[in-house]
Image (cartoon, grey):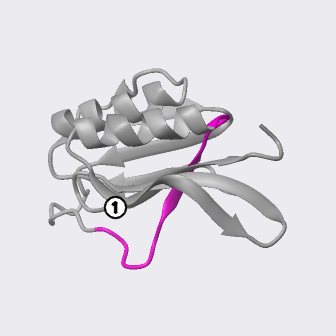
Amino acid sequence: MFTHIMVGCSDPARTKVFYDALFGALGGTPGFDTGKGAFYQHNGGAFGFTLPANGQPATHANGGTIGFGATSTEMVDAWHAAGLANGGTCEGAPGPRPMPGRNLYGAYLRDLDGNKICAFVDLDKA
């Protein structure tokens, strides 16, 4: 459906530390440094961040959320803790997320530039 997801950042070095910690909590590896940002490949998906090409300040999507897959509640908890420890802000503590027909557990953060991100595990498939 998509080739990758990219968000803007204002401080590539600091943002890389943040996302390296988050993807590490999900079993991924540190991102490939592009000089202006980084790319991550994990579980068939690609995610990146970069300084905006137009030189304008990075902004976040109002109402947008980027979701990352986890395989256990412990992984979601570790992801959330890694984000908080590296400068993220809580948008929703880890816990059950009721949805009709699905047994989900997830957590939400804002990254260093205000992008809303989450990690979820489907407990019926874990």
Which one is in front, 91 or 45? 91
Determine if residue 77 is in view: yes
> Looking at the rendering, in which quadrant would you find the N terminus?
bottom right
Question: Is 112 above or below relative to 45?
Answer: below
Image quadrant assignment for residue 48 = top left
Query: Residue at position x 84%, y 67% from top?
Result: 101
Query: Residue at position x 62%, y 52% from top?
Result: 105
Question: Is 91 above or below relative to 43?
Answer: below
Q: What predominant SS class does the magenta segment belong to?
A: loop
Q: Position of residue 44 (x, y in %)?
A: 68, 36
Which one is in front, 87 or 6? 87
Query: Which portion, as a residue range, is magenta?
Result: 60-72
Mark 1 secondary-structure assignment? loop
Q: Position of residue 100 (x, y in %)?
A: 79, 73
Crowding around mark 1 (Cα neighbors within 10 Å: few <14, some 14 to 19, many 20+) is many
> Looking at the rendering, in which quadrant would you find the C terminus?
top right
Q: Position of residue 118 (x, y in %)?
A: 49, 54
Question: Is 75 above or below relative to 48?
Answer: above
Residue 62 on the magenta segment:
yes
Which one is in front, 88 or 103? 103
Q: Residue furthest front?
A: 95
Image quadrant assignment for residue 20 = top left
Determine if residue 36 is in view: no
Q: Position of residue 32 (x, y in %)?
A: 39, 25
Residue hosting label 1: 115
Residue type (three-letter) at the residue carrying disc 1: Asn
Query: Residue at position x 55%, y 32% from top?
Result: 74
Q: How many marks?
A: 1
Query: Residue at position x 32%, y 41% from top?
Result: 83
Residue 79 on the magenta segment:
no
